[in-house]
């Protein structure tokens, strides 16, 4: 129990990190971490042998090309088990809260996400998968998701994705238990200054934010009853989405779409979009991307983003580090 964090709904998550990931959970020493990692590897093997279903959620800063994935929350789910579902609240398998800032933990996530026998349920997996596949700094991920189902695609097309917050309005409150409302972190406030919204070690509140999303996704699926057409459509759409991401390793389609939104925005959202655009472009430069006939268009996007950032007094370093962490401790009162 020394290395366990508890979600808002009371579900236990094993904290897997070489350092202090959550403020209320101390960092393990080297021997303790190796023991933890060994237990987790054995647990994953048992999940693979059982052909288990897991709910997965990733957090980080401006996920997608140029962003940084830092945290993973995963938990086995019995939501598709017709025998266990009526007693789902009584079945609380140990979840995993994994620090994705070091290679030892990246290996754990890679094992799960690339497993051909563990089914992973996610919500809004597009940007998460871009990071998993193509993030190079500050740590190489190179994770190729398989047997993944983006549940969001069962309820909305890829070009107009339904937010989790709006979807949750259709979910019976009883399925969510004590989980608070979805939006707790003012991402735009932090990201408008190229700052981290999730400072480490995580506060209990921010740790719960990640863990609670696992229950939210499970509640959405459970609200639909037994797997049917919604699940099949999500499987097909997810494979199509992953194929598009693989076919566009530099994320140029995502860059163009983000630029379209940038041109429509004003105020804080425009600055946030400019930060994201610049980070994306800098990530391409660091990778030595051959943009071919898109080079001129990307250059125009860079100039527009640079102009907005200059006016806002924001600098995005070429090494893609985040700045102002000590200044942006807390978002202003809403």
Image (cartoon, helix red, strand yellow):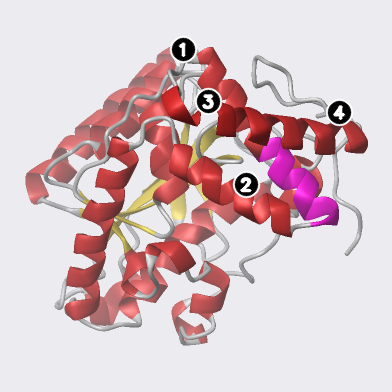
Which image quarter is the C terminus in? Answer: bottom right
Nearer the viewer's eye, disc 1 or disc 2? 2
Residue 319 x/y as whole percent: 65, 14
Disc 3 or disc 1, which is closer to the eye?
A: 3
Which residue is found at the position 76% from the left and 54% from the top? 269
Point out residue 203 in the picture as x, y percentages from the top left corner. Answer: 70, 43
The residues colored magenta run: 266-276
> In the image, which is nearer the foreground, mark 3 or mark 4?
3
Q: Secondary structure at mark 2?
A: helix
Where does residue 313 sit, x and y in percent of width and height?
91, 32
Above or below residue 334? Residue 325 is above
Mark 1 residue element: helix
Q: Left or right: 283 with respect to 46?
A: right
**Residue 195 sits in which quadrant?**
top right
Q: Label for residue 30?
A: 1
Is 222 rendered above or below residue 199?
Answer: below
Mark 2 — residue?
Answer: 259
């Amino acid at each position: 129990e020394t290395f366990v964090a508890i979600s808002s709904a009371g579900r236990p998550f094993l904290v897997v990190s070489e350092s202090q990931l959550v403020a209320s959970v101390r960092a393990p020493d080297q021997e303790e971490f190796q023991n933890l990692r060994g237990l987790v590897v054995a647990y994953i093997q048992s999940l693979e042998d059982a052909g288990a279903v897991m709910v997965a959620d990733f957090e980080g800063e401006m996920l997608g090309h140029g962003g940084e994935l830092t945290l993973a929350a995963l938990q086995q789910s019995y939501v598709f088990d017709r025998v266990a579902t009526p007693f789902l609240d009584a079945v609380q398998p140990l979840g995993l809260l994994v620090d994705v800032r070091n290679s030892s933990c990246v290996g754990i996530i890679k094992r799960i996400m690339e497993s051909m026998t563990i089914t992973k349920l996610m919500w809004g997996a597009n940007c998460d998968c871009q990071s998993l596949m193509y993030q190079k700094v500050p740590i190489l991920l190179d994770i190729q998701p398989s047997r993944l189902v983006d549940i969001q695609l069962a309820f909305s097309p890829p070009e107009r994705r339904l937010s989790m917050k709006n979807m949750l309005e259709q979910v019976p409150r009883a399925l969510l238990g004590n989980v608070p409302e979805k939006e707790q972190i003012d991402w735009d406030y932090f990201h408008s200054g190229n700052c981290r919204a999730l400072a480490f070690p995580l506060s209990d509140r921010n740790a719960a934010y990640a863990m609670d999303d696992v229950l939210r996704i499970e509640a959405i699926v459970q609200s639909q009853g037994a797997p049917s057409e919604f699940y099949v459509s999500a499987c097909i759409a997810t494979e199509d989405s992953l194929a598009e991401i693989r076919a566009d390793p530099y994320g140029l389609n995502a860059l163009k779409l983000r630029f379209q939104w940038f041109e429509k925005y004003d105020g804080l959202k425009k600055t946030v979009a400019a930060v994201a655009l610049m980070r994306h472009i800098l990530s391409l430069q660091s990778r030595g991307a051959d943009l071919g006939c898109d080079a001129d268009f990307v250059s125009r996007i860079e100039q527009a983003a640079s102009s907005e950032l200059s006016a806002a007094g924001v600098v995005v370093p070429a090494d893609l580090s985040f700045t102002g962490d000590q200044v942006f401790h807390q978002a202003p009162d809403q």
